Amino acid sequence: MATLRVDDRSLLDWVNRATFSNPFSEERERADRVIAAGHEVQQDGAAMTPIRDVEERVSACLARVLPAGRVLSEFAQADQERLEHALLFHVFHASVPELDALITRQTGNPKPIGFPAGAEILGALTSRGVSPERARRALALFYQMRRAFVFISSGLVGAAPSLRQLRESLWAHVFTHDVRRYERFLWNRMEDFSTLLEGETGSGKGAAAAALGRSGFIAWDDARGRFEASYEALFIAVNLSELSPALVESELFGHRKGAFTGAVDSHEGLFARCPPHGVVFLDELAEVSPALQVKLLRVLQERSFTPVGDRTPQRFVGRVVAATNAEIDALRAEGRFRDDLFYRLCSDRVRVPSLRARLAEDPDELSRLVDTVITKIVGAATPALTSEVSTAIARDLPSDYRWPGNVRELEQCVRRVLLTGAAGPLSPTRADVPNVPEWLTAAAAGSLDARGLLAAYCGMLRARLGSFEEVARVTGLDRRTVKKYVDAATRE
C-alpha cells in the first residue's frame, strides 16, 4: 500500500480546502497563498496569489506521487481522498481554456454544442482510477463552476467590500457554502432553494439573477459528446411590472386556446418552459396582485401550476429567483405582500448594493466601472477613453452626486460623454433656458389644485430617481401614498 509523506499530506489538505471553498472568499485566498508559498503567510494587503503558482505546486506533487500508471486505489483510504481532490483541482484548472472556449461558443445559442475536449478530461480522471460515473459528474461540476465564476465575475465588476460580499453570496446560492455537500446531495435538489434579490433600480439585480440562472447544473451526455443543454436555455426572465394584470397570469402559467377573448392559440408559460436546473426570474415581484401571490405560493409550495383555461396541473421543475426594488418588509407590514409567500420565497435574501454605497466604501470603484463600460462599448480596454470620461464626470457632476439610477445611470452617462463630451443631465437641447413642464406653468398660474400638484411632482421625481422609495425619502411621504400619486400622474 503506497503512502504519502507528511509534507505531501499537509499540502494536499490545503488543496482540499482550496478545491471546495468559495473562490470569492477570504478562505480561498488564504489557501492559495499557503499552497503557493509552502507555509502559512501573512496577507499584509498583498495582491492575490496568481493561480498559476498554486497550480504549479499541485502539478509537481501529483507528478511525483501519482505518475502515469499509478491509480488512487493503491493508497490508503484517507490518502485516496486527498489525492482525488488534488487530481480534481489539477484537471479542472488544466481544462479552464477549453471550458472558457465552450462558454464563448455557446453564447446566444439555445441548443447545446459539441465539446470534443470532454473525452480528454474524462480520460485524465479515469486513467488515475476515478470511476466513470464520478468522472462524468466531475466534468459537469467543472463546467458549472467555471460558468458560475465567469458570469459572477463579469456581470458584477468592482472591488468595493459590499460587491465582493455579493459575489461570494451568489456563489453560495449556486453551490451552497459547502461544495462537497452540494456535489454529494444537492446538485439535483436546488429547485427547492428560492432567492430574493433586493436593491434599488439599476443596481444590478438583473445581472445577479442572470449569473445565478446561467450557472445551473448541466449533465454530460457521453453518447453525444456534449453537455445535455445550453446554459442559455436555463435562464428565463420576466419583468412583472411591464405586463398588464390580465397578461401576467398567462405569461407565467400559460393558457389554453379559447381560455379568454383573444386566446386564439394555446400558449406555454414560463413555468412550463423552464427546464430542470433552470431559473425563472421574476423581476419587480412586489407589483403583483394578492390573487397572483396566492398562485405563486402554490408553485413554490406544491411545485405545480395550472394554465389558464385548463384543469390539469403541471409540474414546475425549475427554481425561482425574484427581485424587487421595494422595501418588502414595509409591504408586508401594510398587508400588500403575503407573509407566507415571503417565507416560502426566501431561502435567503441577497442585497445588491447601490452605486453610492459602493463609492462610499471605495471611491476608486467609479473609475473601475467606467473602464468596464468603455471596454464593453469599444471591445477592448482603452485607458485614454476611460480617463476622458472620468474627467468629464468629475467636472460636470457634484462630488457628492448620489447616482439615483445606479450602475444603469452610469452606463448611460458614459455613453453621453462619448456622444457629447459632457456628463451633465440629459436634455433635449443645450439652450440656456430649459423647457418648463406644463404642470409648473399651471401651478404658477394658480390653475392646479394641491392633489394635481403633488401627483405631478411625485411623477417627475419617480422618472428622475427611479424608485418609489427614493421619492418617499425626498417628499417625506410613505411609499403607498407616493405610488398613488405617481399612478394618478400617469393617468393624467
Image: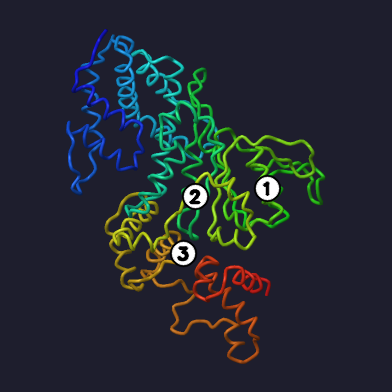
Amino acid at circle 3 = Gly
What is the number of the mark on residue 251?
1
Label 2: element kind: strand
Q: Nearer the viewer, residue 376 or 79?
A: 79
Q: Residues within 10 Å of mark 3 (few under 14, many from 20)?
A: many
Q: Which residue is mark 3?
A: 405
Give the foreground label among 2 and 3: 2
Which one is in front, 211 or 6? 6
Check the image and report above or below for 187 versus 152: above
**Amino acid type at mark 1:** Glu
Disc 1 element: helix
Q: State left or right for residue 406 relative to residue 263.
A: left
Q: What's under tag 2, amino acid-wise?
A: Arg
The answer to whether residue 485 is left or right of residue 461 is: right
Q: Nearer the viewer, mark 2 or mark 1?
A: 2
Front residue of 443/340: it is 340
Question: On the rendered image, what quadrant is the N terminus found in?
Answer: top left
In three-dimensional space, the C-alpha distance between marks 1 and 3, rounded to whole angstroms, equals: 28 Å
Residue 356 shows which numbered tag? none
Residue plotted at (57% across, 52% down): 283
Mark 2 vs mark 3, CA separation in Å: 22 Å
Q: Earlier in the sequence, mark 2 or mark 3?
A: 2
Residue position marked by numbered label 2 in the rendering: 349
Query: Sequence-wise, which precedes: disc 1 or disc 3?
Result: 1
* Residue 300, image x, y percentages: 63, 42
The residue nearer to you, when weighing 172 against 436, is 172
Q: Which label's residue is closer to the chain start, 2 or 1?
A: 1
